Amino acid sequence: MVKEKVEDYVRTIPDFPEKGIMFRDITSVLQDPDGLKLAIDGIQEKVKDLDFDVIAGTESRGFIFGMPVAYNLHKPFVMIRKKGKLPCETVQQTYDLEYGQATIEMHKDAIKPGQKVVIIDDLIATGGTVEAAAHLVEQLGGEVVRMVFLMELAGLEGRERLKNYSVESVIAYPGK
């Protein structure tokens, strides 16, 4: 049976990874061709009238959702990866996690000064990863014109952290 909205394909798992958390699982979206189409179409709809040059995605689910949009719109795709995964000269950005820090990288030649960039990822929670990704784009002289997410966990207030950017999500859940 074909469902009408992408959120109908998202599987919710209560109390994972800990009690009180409602885990929103996207594997059920990816495993269904109709769900996947709705997800990609929903993300693409958020940039349809936007003037931009490049799509960037964060490892790894930003690749899953960003690549098809880049392909459909005939735009280049830039990978933002975990430290140590890219073979050429990179710029790096370290950011805080709940328990520690992480570093992401982008090739130095991935963004040209003045390019308008859309960053795509699967989820906005606290906003730390995508904020770090935006800083990488800006280090290279690019301008982040929009951030697009399949899902938003509004209770974690990532949108507030990213208030200086245009933020769109296909699905917004009120909690954490």
Image (cartoon, rainbow, N blue to C red):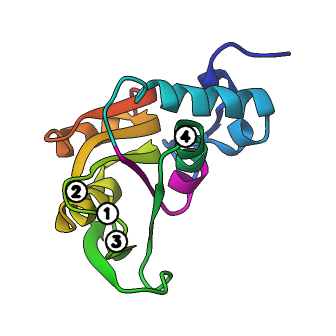
Q: Magenta includes 63?
A: yes
User: Which residue corresponds to mark 3?
Assistant: 99
Which dot, 4 or 1, sits closer to the camera?
A: 1
Q: Give the range drawn in magenta.
A: 53-64
State the mark number for residue 154: none
Residue 74, x across and y down, in percent: 53, 43
In terms of secondary structure, where does tag 4 sit? helix
Which dot, 1 or 3, sits closer to the camera?
A: 1
Give whichever of discs 2 and 3 has the lower sequence position.
Answer: 3
Alpha carbon distance from label 3 to label 4: 33 Å
Q: Which of 77 and 147 is in front in this view?
A: 77
Alpha carbon distance from label 2 to label 3: 30 Å
User: Which residue corresponds to mark 1?
Assistant: 111
Give whichever of discs 4 and 1 has the lower sequence position.
Answer: 4
User: Which residue corresponds to mark 2?
Assistant: 142
Q: Magenta includes 61?
A: yes
Q: Nearer the viewer, residue 25 or 15?
A: 25
Alpha carbon distance from label 1 to label 3: 31 Å
Give whichever of discs 1 and 3 has the lower sequence position.
Answer: 3
State the mark number for residue 69: 4
Alpha carbon distance from label 1 to label 2: 6 Å
Residue 52, x across and y down, in percent: 33, 40
Residue 21 versus residue 34 in the image, above or below: below
Query: Dot 4, how many residues are within 10 Å of its Cα: few (below 14), some (14-19), or many (20+)?
Result: many
Q: Nearer the viewer, residue 32 or 80?
A: 80
Disc 1, disc 3: CB below 8 Å?
no
Disc 4, disc 1: CB below 8 Å?
no
Give whichever of discs 1 and 2 has the lower sequence position.
Answer: 1
Disc 1, disc 2: CB below 8 Å?
yes
Q: Residue furthest left?
A: 164
